[in-house]
Image (cartoon, rainbow, N blue to C red):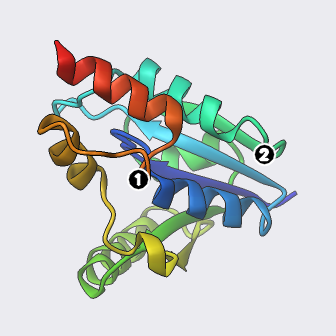
């Protein structure tokens, strides 16, 4: 069974992320969206909230599971018997960073392969940082994130 992990902070998940998840779900028997708990970052939403947001946004994809982890991605992949990591690419600078990470992961575990998916054109500008900035200033984000996430952001910034 081909299992792939799509790791990230997803703070918050965007329609670009969902596009990668949907397309990955057609390539692999199982896709695990793994929310990274990173002590060095100050996320907008808790890990638990991000897991819930993603689960609600992917509930129609029967072969997609949402989980969280901390530590090295390759260690988590071994734990989950996954042989593939999924990474989305928007721009050239993403490729440089992601290729370096793919090579690093391969040195940590020869059993892992990284699969790069180019972001669909309509989402090539989109990032979680862009969404947070727009939401912070009260701009429209309904076309950038799932409905449940837009509602969570609106509640957060109305405080």
Extreme residue in the bottom direction: 92
* Residue at (42% x, 45% y) in the render: 142
**Residue 61 numbered mark, or none:** 2
Where residue 130 appears, as percent x and y from the top left, is 22, 54
Q: Residues within 10 Å of mark 2 (few under 14, many from 20)?
A: some
Q: Using a 10 Å C-alpha cutoff, classify the residue at mark 1 as few (fewer than 14 neighbours), some (14 to 19) or many (20 or more).
A: some
For the point 30% across and 50% down, the residue is 128
Residue furthest to the left: 137
Residue appearing at x 52%, y 76% in the figure: 120
Q: Give the quarter of the image for residue 42.
A: top left
Q: Earlier in the sequence, mark 2 or mark 1?
A: 2
Where does the N terminus fall, quadrant-wise? Answer: bottom right
Residue bearing the label numbered 1:
144
Residue in view at x 30 percent, y 45 percent: 140
Specify whether 72 is left or right of 148.
left
The image quadrant of residue 158 is top left
């Amino acid at each position: 069974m081909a299992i792939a992990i799509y790791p990230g902070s997803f703070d918050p998940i965007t329609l670009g992320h969902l596009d990668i998840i949907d397309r990955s779900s057609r390539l692999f028997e199982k896709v695990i969206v793994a929310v990274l708990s990173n002590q060095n970052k100050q996320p907008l939403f808790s890990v638990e909230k991000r897991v819930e947001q993603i689960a609600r946004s992917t509930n129609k994809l029967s072969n997609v599971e949402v989980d969280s982890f901390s530590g090295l991605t390759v260690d988590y992949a071994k734990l989950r018997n996954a042989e593939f990591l999924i990474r989305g690419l928007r721009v050239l600078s993403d490729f440089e960073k992601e290729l370096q990470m793919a090579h690093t992961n391969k040195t940590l575990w020869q059993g892992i392969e990284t699969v790069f998916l180019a972001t669909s054109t309509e989402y090539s500008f989109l990032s979680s940082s862009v969404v947070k900035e727009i939401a912070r200033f009260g701009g429209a984000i309904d076309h950038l994130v799932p409905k449940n996430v837009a509602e969570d952001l609106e509640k957060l910034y109305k405080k």
